[in-house]
C-alpha cells in the first residue's frame, strides 16, 4: 500500500488571536513541490480573516472527489476502448447541518461534460455504468460518508 502526505502550515499570529480575529490563511505543500494558498471559506469566516483567493477545505474536498472520479472514469473508459478528448466537471458540494447540528458536506454533485475523440462512443447506459464503476472504485469516495451523485 502507499502513504500520502501533505504539509499544512499556518504562522500568522496577531494580537487579536485570542479574540478570534486572526488570519486563517495558510499553505498546503505537497511532495512534488506544489504549494497551494489555502484559507477558511469566506462563507464560514469573514474577510479579512479569510482570503477568498485561497482554496478552502470544502472546495478541496469537492475537488478531491471530482478528481478521483475523473481519473478512475478515464481509466475505465480507456479499458473499454473509448478515447476521451476532454473531461470537465463543475462539481458542487453542499454544506448543511447534520442531525446533531454539526456542519458537514452532506452531498457532492458531479457534473461531468465529456468529449469523445472518435466515433466509438458509449451509449447512455454504458456511460452511466462507467460513472457507476468510477464511483465504486474511486479511493476518495470509498473513504467518505458524503453522498456523491453524478448529475444527468
Image (spheres, rainbow, N blue to C red):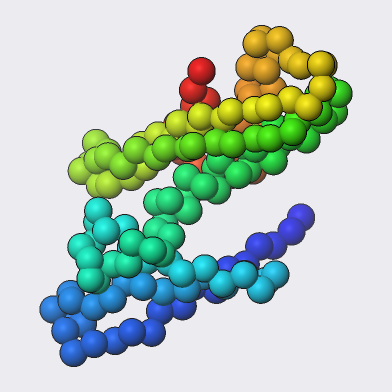
Whether residue 104 sits left or right of residue 127 in the image: it is: left
Asked whether, in this view, residue 6 is left or right of residue 15, the answer is right
Q: Residue 12 in the image: x percent, y percent?
A: 33, 84
**In the displayed image of the protein, which residue is found farthest to the bottom?**
15
Q: Give left or right: position of 71 versus 7.
A: right
Residue at 40% across, 51% down: 58
Quadrant hosting residue 11: bottom left
Q: Position of residue 82 (x, y in %)?
A: 81, 24
Instruction: From the viewer's side, name the closer residue of 46 and 5.
Output: 46
Instruction: Name the residue at the left extreme.
Output: 19
Give the answer, above or below, for where 60 lies relative to 9: above
Q: Image quarter for residue 48?
A: bottom left
Where's residue 15, x and y in %?
18, 90
Residue 100 is at least partly visible in this image: yes
Please identify the quarter of the rendering in which residue 40 is found: bottom left
Residue occupying the point 67% across, 18% down: 127
* Count of numbered badges drawn on the protein: 0
The residue depicted at 40 percent of the width and 79 percent of the height is: 10
Horizontal side, residue 110 vs residue 92: left or right: right
Q: Position of residue 1 (x, y in %)?
A: 76, 55
Residue at 69%, 35% in the rendered image? 86
Residue 76 shows in the view: no
Amino acid at each position: 500500500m502507499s502513504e500520502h502526505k501533505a504539509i499544512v502550515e499556518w504562522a500568522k499570529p496577531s494580537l487579536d488571536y485570542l479574540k478570534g480575529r486572526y488570519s486563517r490563511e495558510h499553505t498546503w505543500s505537497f511532495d512534488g513541490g506544489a504549494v497551494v494558498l489555502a484559507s477558511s471559506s469566506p462563507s464560514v469566516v469573514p474577510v479579512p480573516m479569510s482570503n477568498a483567493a485561497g482554496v478552502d477545505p470544502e472546495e478541496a474536498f469537492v475537488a478531491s472527489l471530482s478528481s478521483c472520479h475523473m481519473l478512475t472514469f478515464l481509466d475505465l473508459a480507456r479499458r473499454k476502448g473509448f478515447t476521451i478528448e476532454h473531461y470537465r466537471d463543475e462539481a458542487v458540494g453542499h454544506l448543511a447541518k447534520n442531525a446533531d447540528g454539526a456542519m458537514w458536506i452532506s452531498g457532492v454533485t458531479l457534473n461531468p461534460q465529456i468529449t469523445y475523440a472518435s466515433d466509438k462512443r458509449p451509449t447512455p447506459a454504458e456511460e452511466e455504468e462507467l460513472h457507476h464503476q468510477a464511483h465504486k472504485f474511486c479511493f476518495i469516495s470509498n473513504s467518505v460518508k458524503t453522498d456523491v451523485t453524478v448529475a444527468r
